[in-house]
Image: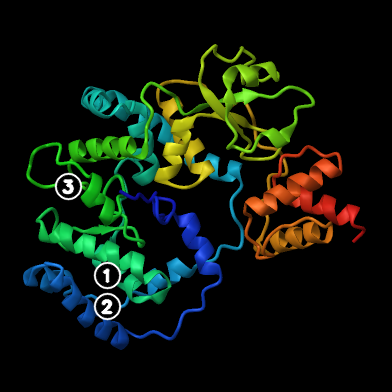
Amino acid sequence: MTMISSFASRIVLALALSWLALGAQAYSPPPQSNADFQKWLQTFKKKAASHGIGATTLEKAFANVTLNTRVLELDRRQPEFTRTFWQYFDAAITDWRVRNGQKLYQKYRPRLHEVTQQYGVPARFIIALWGMETNYGGYTGNTPIIESLATLSYDPRRSGFFQEQLMAALTIIDQGHVSPDQMRGSWAGAMGQCQFMPTNYLKYAVDADNSGKVDLWNSLDDVFYSMGNFLEELGWVRGENWGREVALPEGFDYSLADGETQRPLQAWSEMGLTLADGRALPDETMQAALLLPHDHRGPAFLIYDNFHVIKRWNFSDNYALAVGHLADRIVGRAPLTANPPPNDEALSHQQTRELQERLARAGLPVGPVDGVIGSKTRDALRRYQKREDLPADGYPSPRMLNILRKRQGD
């Protein structure tokens, strides 16, 4: 089950890549060598054999496997800048991705109708996730999975998690689903056109074409049914959308936009929210939370339960918003009404630390001053904004850092 996009590797559920990046920041690895790795590998092979992995599988899977230093570099990489919502969104929702999604939606609609009937997931979401994960199967990754997972299993930082994935990958080979040479994917171990991690491959992948094998590289029947099955298992709510862009009234209390607190649509309507094009919110009994992925200049979204299901695929608001919007565009719905502000900049790691330090200086609890934006930093910023009579959107930005500098006199 886990998936990894063509833009960046990530791990679903237990470890999403946002979690991986945070772990990398405080990690100082011990000295490592291929000689030590090979010794570790011999021990692991005995463990795998004791778990029922066949000798032939072990011999073929680990032939010529060495410590992959490139995988370790990617795992430990700490980006200097994170992307803003608009930077992420504009890279994800391209004209190419929309056009090709629309073509493939029409091409495979009859096949996907069967997936919808069985799992309740509309075809447009399957196509959108397929597009986000691997550009509609165009790039599934070229890293040898056994070597990457063995490298990450040997590295002590998250050895337990990756040893479980490595054992699952060997089981997939042992069961005859795929050969070791074909088992290629992302550096973090995600595989196939829908980028499942090995444990979730075993749990949720479906042999939809009745070939006797689950082939997530070449069988679109297996790919589509596996995606539908996984989304249903994550809690997909039949008959509900993911969310919608909305417009906020003048003087709105932005502290209500925490992305978590659900209220009936009627309650949001009574606060003055409308659809982005000015029409009234639908008269439905659904619950929704309000999410601002950027600052108070927009956009704003009411999000439903299925938004959080998409986030369980990849734990990122920006990812879930991109998938939902791409699904809408695939069926001909309108682009966002909001536009990027002229000064759309991301905070650097050092600037984020300074923002946290200044909020702490203002007497607000920010948690660790570590250069990582978390809920405590956002809550502290929102409290500062309310205290200073600013729109309390809780959005950390160079603009807000400059305000703090100015108001603190340095």
Contact (Cβ within 8 Å) of mark 3 with mark 2: no
Residue 215: numbered disc? 3
Residue 379: numbered disc? none
Report whether 334 appears left or right of 134: right
Q: Position of residue 87 (x, y in %)?
A: 58, 45
Q: Position of residue 84 (x, y in %)?
A: 61, 47
Sequence order check: which comes first, mark 3 or mark 2? 2
Residue picked out by circle 1: 147
Report whether 82 appears left or right of 19: right
Q: Nearer the viewer, residue 325 or 21?
A: 21
Sequence order check: which comes first, mark 2 or mark 1? 2
Residue picked out by circle 2: 66
Q: Is residue 141 above or below residue 121?
A: below
Q: Report if residue 144 is visible in the image.
A: no
Image quadrant assignment for residue 343: top right
- Distance, label 2 to label 1, CA atoms, is 7 Å
Q: Secondary structure at mark 1?
A: helix
Report whether 205 appears left or right of 273: left
- Distance, label 3 to label 1, CA atoms, is 20 Å
Q: Nearer the viewer, residue 360 or 332?
A: 360
Type of amino acid under label 1 = Glu
Q: Is residue 346 above or below residue 210?
A: below
- Distance, label 3 to label 2, CA atoms, is 26 Å
Type of amino acid under label 3 = Asp
Q: Secondary structure at mark 2?
A: loop
Crowd band around label 1 with a 10 angstrom C-alpha radius: few (<14), some (14–19), many (20+): many
